[in-house]
Image (spheres, rainbow, N blue to C red):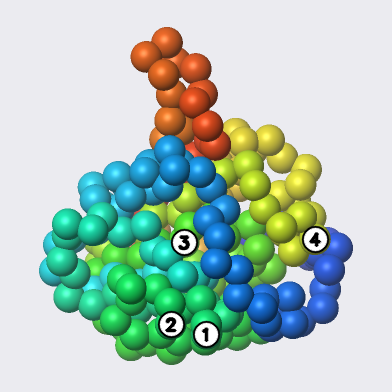
Amino acid sequence: MIREPTLPSAAFRRADETPDEQFYREPRFVTHIDAGAIAAVTALYREYFPAGGRILDLMSSWVSHLPPEVRYGEVVGLGLNRAELERNPQLTSVIVQNLNAAPRLPFADHSHDAAGITVSIDYLTDPVAVLRDLGRVLVPGGPVVISFSNRCFPTKAVAVWHTLDDAGHLRLVQQYLEAAGNWGDIAALDCSPRSARGTLTGDPLYAVVGRATG
């Protein structure tokens, strides 16, 4: 398995190493971030995802947080629970796949225009391999938006995630894209909802954005 070169394999172990299909076998029709953080994700997608484009929602569930007023050519959801995916009204097709067991994506080269990974990057045990293959799947210049907060299923998040604060998570995800080797224009963003005085008003929301280099 290909891993970020500065991190040992132990960094990607989890407290619960049972098959992910077992953990996610029951659907969870809940949101894992609050309304303000969800709005921040939607704003990112509105900014980076092209209208009419072919969108890939990786590690998807029953909601995709895409802007409702934008029409996309297709939205493919890839996740672990079929019931959740089939409930998602924004998806045009669904694929059930465990990226920790099979990081190769079932799509042709340059077949999608943009991709999102929402509050799930912390569960990937080989994130560099997944992101490298995602770079193959997107058109050159196609963006990936990787968003996350300070919540997770703790037993399924990789060990290194637990050792870092929010700034460390941003640096780590940047390193994943850099190590994949086929991403450019990588930027770390703090999109947390705040009051006029700069006070956090709910769940924080962070994102790392990159563009496929072909």
> Does any portion of residue 149 appear in the rendered image?
yes
At 49% from the left edge and 17% from the top edge, which residue is drawn? 199
Q: CA distance from mark 1 to mark 2?
A: 6 Å
At 64% from the left edge and 57% from the top edge, which residue is drawn? 122
Q: CA distance from mark 2 to mark 3?
A: 18 Å
Residue 166 point in image, percent of width and height = 62, 36
Q: Are the residues at dot 4 and dot 3 in contact (C-beta closer than 8 Å)?
A: no
Q: CA distance from mark 3 to mark 1?
A: 17 Å
Please tell me the numbered disc located at residue 82. 1
Q: Amino acid at mark 2?
A: Glu
Q: Which residue is mark 2?
A: 86
Q: Are the residues at dot 1 and dot 2 in contact (C-beta closer than 8 Å)?
A: yes
Image depth: mark 4 or mark 1 in front: 1
Q: Which residue is mark 4?
A: 155
Image depth: mark 4 or mark 2 in front: 2
Please tell me the numbered disc located at residue 117. 3
> Does any portion of residue 3 appear in the rendered image?
no
Q: Amino acid at mark 3?
A: Ile
Image depth: mark 3 or mark 1 in front: 1
Viewer-nearest residue: 21 or 135: 21
Mark toward the start of the polypeptide (4 vs 1): 1
Secondary structure state at the residue bearing disc 1: helix
Q: Are the residues at dot 2 and dot 3 in contact (C-beta closer than 8 Å)?
A: no
Mark toward the start of the polypeptide (3 vs 1): 1
Secondary structure state at the residue bearing disc 4: loop
Q: Are the residues at dot 3 and dot 1 in contact (C-beta closer than 8 Å)?
A: no
Secondary structure state at the residue bearing disc 2: helix
Q: CA distance from mark 4 to mark 3?
A: 19 Å
Q: CA distance from mark 4 to mark 2?
A: 26 Å
